[in-house]
Amino acid sequence: MKNSRVISAAQFRLLSGRALRVNIALWAWGTCILARLHGAIRDEGSSIVITDDGFAIPQPGHVFTYPRDHGSHPEFKLEWWYITGHLKTGNGRRLGFQATFFRQSSPREDRPKEARSAEFSHDQIYLGHFALLDTASGAFIYQSRLNRAGWDAGAATNRLEVWNGNWRLKGREATHKPEWGEASQLDLELAGTIRGDANLALTLSPTQPMVVFGTNGVSRKADGPTAASYYLTFPRLAVSGSVNLRGEILAVEGDAWMDHEVSSSQLGANQVGWDWACLQLNDGRSIMCYRMRQEGGKTDPNSSLTWINKSGQLITFGPSQFSWSGLQHWKSPQTAADYPNHVRLEAMDPATGKMTNLELEPLVENQELTDDLGGVAYWEGACRVKNSDGKEVGHAFLELTGYSGNLAARLK
């Protein structure tokens, strides 16, 4: 297997990788965003496939354990916890929010490889993004943070708890439908400020079971042996809480989506970015879709669209079975990136057996994060979902990367 080798779990603990690069902000954010859809989970007591720089690669058939696998996995290179959601006030005012916690592991090279310990030679870097959209004013505010592990940033390894400054995501034990399994028996608490403009305090509870995307537990995003993922998702979370927006206290309720990914890989050599969307339909079903983009705009064969029914059952289509079309573009006045942020998805609806069209329309055009720390701009925004008759049938979040330049080339 090119760029990988198989070792025992004991040997794995003695290996690490390359040093922290000079431009730590760009490196940490860049490698995290390149791994947007990749991940891996600890597989103790068995052979582990690792990258050349000493990080694990996910393998089929992994048995997940909870709450441990909701937590951090520092033996893997990259990890992130990502929440997006739609909120409403009592009078119908719409808000959108994003909260993302990245973890980046950076092995040192100050000792021979044979003498390194995975537990002690991996410095942990934490990058975070918080964003809030207020449709009443059209304001889109956001902030980035970058900290080393320590008193101001970190993540628990035995449960869900990750923080960066006063940004915190924490799981607490809760009882939901027993048929959902142990992975879904928790509620989430999310809190954080965005500069001096906003303060979010939200509680999130699953209304659909947690799901694992991919084949036999592995989701692949490129042909290379390291470009694989354990992709864990709560596709529907009921949200309640408050938002303090520039001194105005808003009681809010809504829906959210959460991804948890762990990775030791990046984009394929010929991939320049990706388009990703999560849809929550009014009929209780959800959709996750990603299109890995090759040079010239061609869709990579490792792209997919997955329907999730109310009970959490998955039906996945490959790139020949769905289409992703940009209907309208928005050009950023700040970065000049041209984002196709009005999207049409076409795929078979498993409930009817017929093709269906769903259009994603941004609530506000400018939802670009220019990232003053990492320097990588991308568009991540709240959208409404309409059917072919123009009726609003749900809501979504859309992510567009690689439109301000070739993402892979930018981060070499």
Image (cartoon, rainbow, N blue to C red):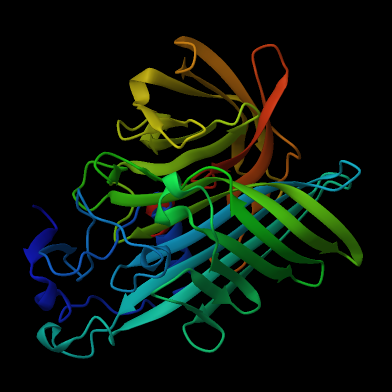
- Place of residue 165 in the rendered image (x, y in percent of width and height, measured from the top left): 62, 79
Determine the residue positioned at 73% across, 18% down.
391
Would residue 91 appear left or right of 242 to someone viewing this image?
Answer: right
From what the image shows, is residue 48 above or below residue 350?
A: below
From what the image shows, is residue 362 above or below residue 112?
A: above
From what the image shows, is residue 289 above or below residue 120?
A: above
Residue 376 visible in the picture: no
- Which of the image's four quarters has the C terminus? bottom left
Front-most of 192 and 112?
192
Determine the residue positioned at 68% across, 68% down.
191
Would residue 314 appear left or right of 219 to someone viewing this image?
Answer: right
- Place of residue 368 in the rendered image (x, y in percent of width and height, measured from the top left): 66, 49
Would residue 127 appear left or right of 224 to someone viewing this image?
Answer: right
Front-most of 25 and 303?
303
- Place of residue 237 in the rendered image (x, y in percent of width and height, measured from the top left): 60, 48
Asked which quadrant contains residue 301, the reply is top left
Residue 298 visible in the picture: yes
From what the image shows, is residue 297 above or below residue 130?
A: above
- Place of residue 135 in the rendered image (x, y in percent of width and height, measured from the top left): 82, 44
